[in-house]
Amino acid sequence: MEYTLEYNSDRPLMIIPEYGRHIQKLVDHCVALESEEERSKMANAIVDVMGNLQPHLRDVPDFKHKLWDQLFIMSKFELEVEPPFRKPDKTELEAKPEPLPYPKMASKYRFYGHNIQTMIKVALSWDEGELRTALIFNIANHMKKCYLNWNKDTVDDAVIFKHLKDLSNGEIDLINSEEVLSSTSNLLKKTANARSSNSNHRNNHKNKNHRNNKGHQNRHKN
């Protein structure tokens, strides 16, 4: 007796492989049925089986609608039945999304992050005065802290002022300013304290969850 082996490489590709080849064969058979009543009956049965194979979809809103959409996709939109929901449009599904523009940021000073440009724009939009000056020096201190995160060595205030002038297209010029930014040691200390606080918070949250789970297990045993 001779056996003919059917290799997956010789089989047609499955459109939605998560449901397996048997479901795909059922869909193909349903498409080939001549009677619309039989196609409709079998299509509803296939959707029920698909729902059982993907139980997590039951938690998704309109999961039945999604199953019917997948059924039409698996049939290559050749299934001719009246679904309980709007039939998906092949053109809409196959349409390519519009390309997303990449955010434009200063390539020379990436270590400051993208938000620094937004902060500078806000400062430039304010009227001249103490509030604007205070915001500009806060921005400069933040830039110094970001610079120290990227380079652990010390940094001169003149470097930060030059970078701030470049990022603001020359509209913020503190190069000749006599003001002094926060010291390197203070900024590094604040960064270390912030990291330590975040680490302690995560550990406390993890220990609290562990205690709660342990208490739940003990109550379950009792």
Image: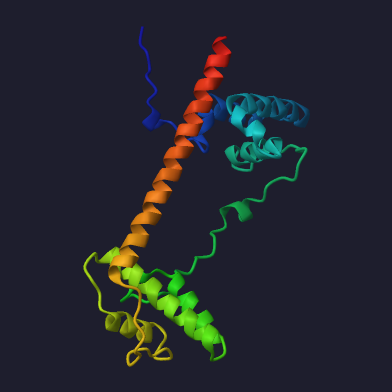
Outermost residue toward the top in this view: 1
Left or right placement of residue 177 versus residue 20 in this view: left
In front of the other: 9 or 210: 210
Q: Nearer the viewer, residue 48 or 142?
A: 142
Q: Position of residue 51 (x, y in %)?
A: 64, 28
Q: Which image quarter is the C terminus in? A: top right
Q: Nearer the viewer, residue 127 or 100?
A: 127
Residue 26 on image: x %, y %: 60, 26
Q: Quadrant of residue 126?
A: bottom right
Q: Is residue 42 above or below residue 61?
A: above
Q: Is residue 50 visible?
A: yes
Relative horizontal placement of residue 107, taking residue 85 as reference (left or right): left
Query: How many circles with numbers are drawn on the protein?
Result: 0
Q: For the N terminus, give its image quadrant.
A: top left
55 up-or-down from 145: above or below: above
The percent position of residue 206, horizontal first and vertical second, equals 45, 35
Instruction: Look at the image and tell me whether residue 12 can be seen.
Output: no
Point 68% across, 47% down: residue:
88
Residue at image location 53% in from the left, 59% down from the top: 96
Where is residue 74, by image quadrant? top right
Would you say 66 lies left or right of 7 here? right
* Apparent side of residue 198 relative to residue 94 in the rendered image (left or right): left
**Which residue is located at x 38 percent, y 74 percent?**
141
